[in-house]
Image (tube, rainbow, N blue to C red):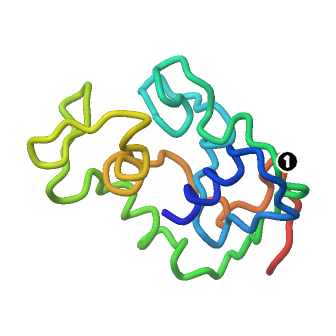
Amino acid sequence: MWDFVLAALLRSGKDRPAIRSSELAAITSSYAKATKDTILRYANYPTNNGPCYFSGTAGAGNYINFYNANDWALAADHWQLDQDLKPDRAFFYNGINFFAGTDMLSLPQDTYQIFAYCDEARCYALGAQANVSGFSILGS
């Protein structure tokens, strides 16, 4: 969830010399449109035809991908499995809206809760991919 806190800082337009987002498992479709036909709020925020979540970020001098093929947290049986199992317990999706118990969640008010517990990322984490357009690669 820290990656979305950093994103909020970037979206604010405040000057930041560099942002290290991959260790926080940023979702690559937040930076570029998804090619699937299904709705993905990271790539279409906050509406079906909206821009990518990180669209319009300003204030970072550099975007750095700390690619690490050996990162335990980004392995298929950890981060990817967590994404595949969303929505988490006590949350559900009825095909139109996300819910926390009986409370309907909506964007942009509930962005962090939806991204952390409800909306599945249909891609790899940023630090799990070596060649992400627009990012400098540092790490091992």
What percent of the width, then of the height, locates residue 94? 18, 31
Seen from this angle, which residue lies furthest left?
102
Left or right, 56 with reference to 110? right
What residue do we see at 64% from left, 59% from top?
6
The quarter of the picture where residue 17 lies is bottom right
Left or right, 104 with reference to 130? left
What residue do we see at 46% from left, 67% from top?
79
Q: In this view, does 11 lie above or below 126?
A: above
What residue do we see at 66% from left, 59% from top?
126
Closer to the camera in the image, 78 or 115: 115
Q: Dot 1 surroundings within 10 Å: few (below 14), some, or many (20 or more)?
A: few
The quarter of the picture where residue 66 lies is bottom right
What percent of the width, then of the height, locates residue 28? 64, 49
What amino acid is at disc 1?
Answer: Gly
Q: In which quarter of the image is the C terminus?
A: bottom right
Residue position marked by numbered label 1 in the rendering = 134
Q: Is residue 127 above or below residue 49?
A: below
What residue do we see at 56% from left, 34% from top?
43
What percent of the width, then of the height, locates residue 90? 14, 56
The quarter of the picture where residue 68 lies is bottom right
Closer to the camera in the image, 132 or 15: 15
Q: Is mark 1 on a helix, strand or loop?
A: loop
